[in-house]
Image (cartoon, helix red, strand yellow):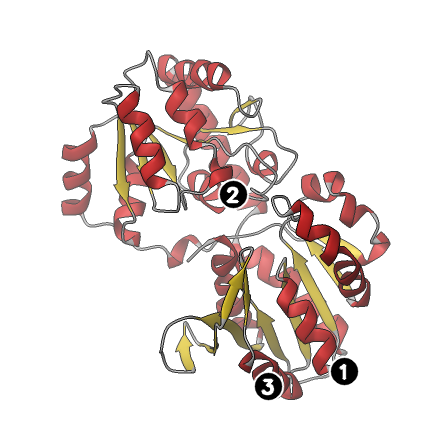
Amino acid sequence: MGGVEQVINQIARGAILHGVETDVLSLTPDRVPRTIEIDGYLAHRARLDIQIASTGFSASAFFRFSQLAKDADVIHFHFPWPFMDMVHFATRAKKPTLVTYHSDIIRQKHLLKLYRPLQRKFLRSMNHIVATSPNYLATSEVLAKMGDKVCVIPIGLDKATYPEPSPERLRFWQSKVGQKFFLFVGVIRYYKGLHILIEAAQGTDYPIVIVGAGPIENELKAQAVALGLSNVHFLGQLPDEDKVALLKLCYAVVFPSHLRSEAFGISLLEGAMYGKPMISSEIGTGTTFINIGGQTGLVVPPSDPTALRHAMRRLWEYPEEAAEMGERAEERYWKYFTADKMVAEYVKLYRGLAGEPIQDKLLKLER
């Protein structure tokens, strides 16, 4: 699961405990069953027909959405997904709506000019808009125009849903990567800033472990080879047990995302959840709502390999300070970022929008 899918999963499975029944609609290119049960909720898949500028389109989704919306009390969208804006207006579902605003549209600037009128109409048609951090709300020009219909509900994770790695897996990875290393976990995309991390690794011998796969993976591997780096280890995509094992074993989490496309940082939050000091960049998004510079870790300017190298050196050379930061990171997770807190806030919104008393049924939408 990517970040948005993880959020939807946490909300859907957690809302069951509040008596809220959830249906999730998404698109898939695969020939799979149209509906399956996941973690106690129903996941419905419409056929992906075409993808343009990272946006999936589906002819069958119009009918599928319309069917599901008839039985829903509230419809919960996840933005950005411009295709679903079209579905929303085309099907004219007369139900209360809210949207979780995950990110501004950053990369597709030319297409955004064409899409902007529809975007404004869609957001203004929502009964409520949720931002995932006060940082993003304060820095998004789009959200600034939406007035008092916007609130903040931070993304939360349920640590109990993460697998406990066996002693054998822990010993296996410790033998592979050593006892002290920096860890990055995530999909390897252009905005993750891994090219900056690789450049920062020059002149150091700190082991850096990169977990994940993605469209620029080979490009980054070639960069590491060209720089003659033997301390950067690409492990590819791993099962959750292995990922948790590495989170437990790592010395610190490094998260060098340098563009606002990184709106929150789920894997950064996972680092906090496991009590690790963090290094991230100040990009005006949720990354510095999770990681408070000087308290839970270090925050550096974006796209600055020298500053990133210095931050790594500071944590590496001052283990007591790093350990204290990790402890404060975990304390902050329990205070602000549990799935229970997130789900409770969404259920309040659902009930407020639908009106009580009601047999709650939700329809969520994901990319």
Q: CA distance from mark 2 to mark 3?
A: 34 Å
Reply above or below: 366 against 110. below
The residue shown at (35%, 19%) is 201
Which amino acid type corresponds to the residue marked 3 in the rendered image? Phe
Type of the residue with mark 1: Lys
Query: Quick check: 310 left or right of 244?
Result: right
Is residue 229 visible to us here?
yes
Residue denoted by label 3? 63
Q: Quadrant of residue 114?
A: bottom right
| Frontmost residue, 114 versus 132 | 114
Q: Which one is nearer the viewer's eye here, 289 or 59? A: 59
Could you say where residue 225 lies in the image, as x and y percent from the top left?
26, 25
Q: Which residue is mark 2?
A: 265
Q: Which image quadrant is residue 289 in? A: top right
Specify which label sits upstream in the sequence, 1 or 2.
1
Q: Is residue 164 visible?
A: no
**Residue designated by label 1:** 94
